[in-house]
Amino acid sequence: MGEAIIVMMPFVIYMAANKQSMTLIELYYSDICMNCHYVRNQIIDVLPKGVMFKEINVTSLEGTERAKQLGIEEVPTITINGEVVLIGRVEKDEIREELEEFL
């Protein structure tokens, strides 16, 4: 459970110390979810430079815990900076629109 927080904490501290903000988009997915693979490709196609992208498999121990913390019950689910913004099969325009609010 705490592994993701421990891994991200030095990055968060570095960014705060240097007064920089970094946008992080996370895709919560399952290997057997066809819509998850589709959404992953949509994200990659519109991912702007400087935005970090992380995939989190909800069937892993870490993924299960993180999904539970955020109240995620369906995949694919996209979060931006820890906030759930999109659920289900979405298109590039929807992803781009959500990203613009955080940039």
Image: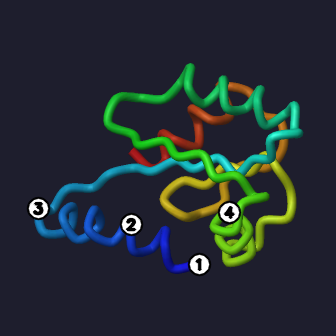
CA gap, disc 2 to disc 4? 14 Å
Residue at 48% in and 29% down: 47
Residue ID at (28%, 62%): 11
- For disc 1, the marked residue is 1
- Look at discs 1 and 3 and give the one toward the viewer: 1
- Are the residues flagged by discs 4 and 1 in contact, CB closer than 8 Å? no
In terms of depth relative to the viewer, which is nearer, 100 or 56?
56
- Residue 44 position, x and y percent, is 56, 26
Camera-near label (3 vs 4) is: 4
Quarter-wise, where is residue 58 in the image? bottom right
**Which residue bears the numbered disc 3?**
18
Q: Is residue 103 above or below residue 81?
A: above
Residue 67 position by quadrant: bottom right
Q: Nearer the viewer, residue 101 or 43?
A: 43
- Tell me which amino acid carries mark 4: Gly
Residue at (80%, 47%) from the top-left corner?
Answer: 30
Q: Residue 102's x, y, as percent?
A: 44, 50
Labels 2 and 1: the sequence-earlier one: 1
Q: Earlier in the sequence, mark 1 or mark 3?
A: 1
* Kind of residue indicated by mark 2: Val
Q: What crowding class fits label 4: few (fewer than 14 Cα within 10 Å), some (14-19), or many (20 or more)?
A: some
Q: Secondary structure at mark 3?
A: loop
Query: Measured from the top left, where is residue 40 in percent x and y?
Result: 67, 32
Q: Quadrant of residue 8?
A: bottom left
The dot on residue 7 is 2
Task: Say which label, 3 or 4, has the lower sequence index.
Answer: 3
Numbered disc 1: secondary structure: loop
Residue marked by disc 4: 63
The alpha-carbon separation of the residues under discs 3 and 4 comes to 29 Å
Contact (CB < 8 A) between labels 1 and 3?
A: no
Residue at the (65%, 70%) spot, across then down: 66
